[in-house]
Amino acid sequence: MTSVGFIGLGNMGTPMACNLVAAGLQVTGHDVAEGARTVAAAKGVDIADSAVAAAANRDVVITMLPDGAALLEVYRTIMADVRAGTVLMDCSTVDIASARKAHDMAAERNLPSVDAPVSGGIAGAEAGTLTFMVGGDPQACEAVRPLLDIMGRTIVLCGGPGCGQAVKICNNMILGISMIGVCEALTLARELELEPERVFDVVSTSSGSCWSMNDYCPLPGVGPESPADHDYRPGFAAALMLKDLGLSQQAAASVDVATPMGAMAASVYETMVASGMGHLDFSAVIRHVRSLTRE
Ligand code: NAD
C-alpha cells in the first residue's frame, strides 16, 4: 500500500487527504494548527505530532501550504529525515523562485520532486475533480500520477521544475482580469437598465463568453449556481486571488514582461481586500466595482 505524508491540512489539504484515505492509501498528516489537525482526524486522517513524523518513511510526501515561505520552512524541517526514494510533491500555490528552490533542496538529497499546484477550489478538492498543473522530472511526475488521478480529474504535465507553478500563475492572472471585466460589464448593463439574465444569455454564447461569466457568474440568480448565490461565501477567497495576482506580477517582473491588465487587476483586488472583503469569494469584486461607480 502506498504510504503518504500530508503536511498542511487546511481547506484544501484535508479534503485532498480524505480522498486518498478513501482510496485505501495509508495517509499520515500534520498541520501546525491544532484546529486543522482536529478536523482532519475527525475525517479519518491519521495525525502525526510533527512534520518530521508525517514525512519520515513515506513513499510520497505532499505539502499543501499557504505560500513559498511555509513550503521552504517545512522542507528545511523534514529534509534530513525523508528516506531515500520518497517523492516530494508540493501542491500549494507558491512563487516560482520558491518552487525551484524546493526542487533544488530535494535534488541535493537525490529525492525526486514535483510541483503540482491545483485549480478547482474546495469543491474540486472534495469531489476529487481538481486540475493539477505538474512540473518536474517526467519520471517523478509519472510516479505520483496514481495519486493525482485520485485527487483530480485533469492532469497536465507542464514541463520541468517550477513549470506547474508558472502555468498556474498565468491561468489565475487571466481569471483575475476576466472576473473584473465581467463585473464591469454587468455593472454597466445594470446602469443601462438591461435585464441581467438577457445579458448572461447573450454573453455566455457570444465572443464575451468566459468561465467567469458562464460558470461562475458574479450575480445571484443568474447562470449556474455560484458563490454569488451564497452571499459570496468562497469558493476562492479574494485574499487568495490577490496572492496569486501578486505572484504573477512578481513572475512578470522577473522576466521583464509588461502585464498592465494583470497589474491593474492586482491593484483592484488589493483595494478590495484592504476594504475588508478579503474573506469573500473573489467574484464579490462586483461589490467593489459598484462601489467605485457610486463614488
Ligand atoms: P489554508 O490556509 O486553509 O491551509 C493551509 C494550512 O497550512 C493551514 O491549516 C496552516 O495551519 C498550515 N500550515 C501553515 N504553515 C505550516 C507549517 N509550517 N507546517 C504545517 N502546516 C502549516 O489554505 P488552503 O485554502 O487549504 O490553500 C492551500 C494552498 O492551496 C494555498 O497555497 C492556496 O493558494 C492554494 N489553493 C487554494 C484554493 C482554494 O480555493 N482554497 C484553490 C487553489 C489553490
Image: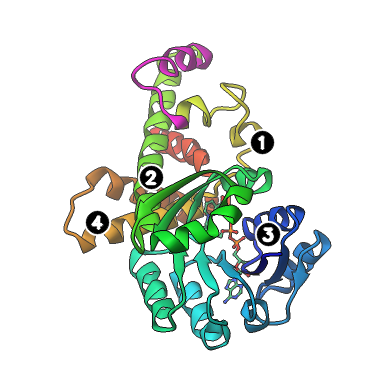
What is the magenta range?
196-211
Measure the C-alpha gap from mark 4 to mark 1: 34 Å
Measure the C-alpha gap from mark 2 to mark 3: 25 Å
* Residue 289 location, quadrant: top left
Measure the C-alpha gap from mark 2 to mark 1: 25 Å
Q: Secondary structure at mark 1?
A: helix
Q: Which residue is nearer to you in this view: 166 or 136?
A: 136
Q: Secondary structure at mark 4?
A: helix
* Residue 46 location, quadrant: bottom right
Horizontal placement of 7 versus 143: left or right? right
Q: Looking at the picture, how far across and down is residue 138, in whole percent?
A: 40, 59
Q: Secondary structure at mark 3?
A: helix
Foreground mark, 4 or 3?
3
Q: Which residue is mark 4?
A: 252
Amino acid beneath label 2: Asn
Q: Is residue 91 visible?
A: no
Who's the residue at 46% across and 71% down the image? 112
Task: Return the residue found at the far right.
Answer: 42
The chosen color scheme is rainbow
Q: Which residue is mark 3?
A: 17
Q: Which residue is mark 2?
A: 171
Amino acid beneath label 3: Ala
> Mark 2 vs mark 3: which is more N-terminal?
3
Q: Which residue is mark 1?
A: 230
- Contact check, label 4 and label 1, Cβ < 8 Å: no
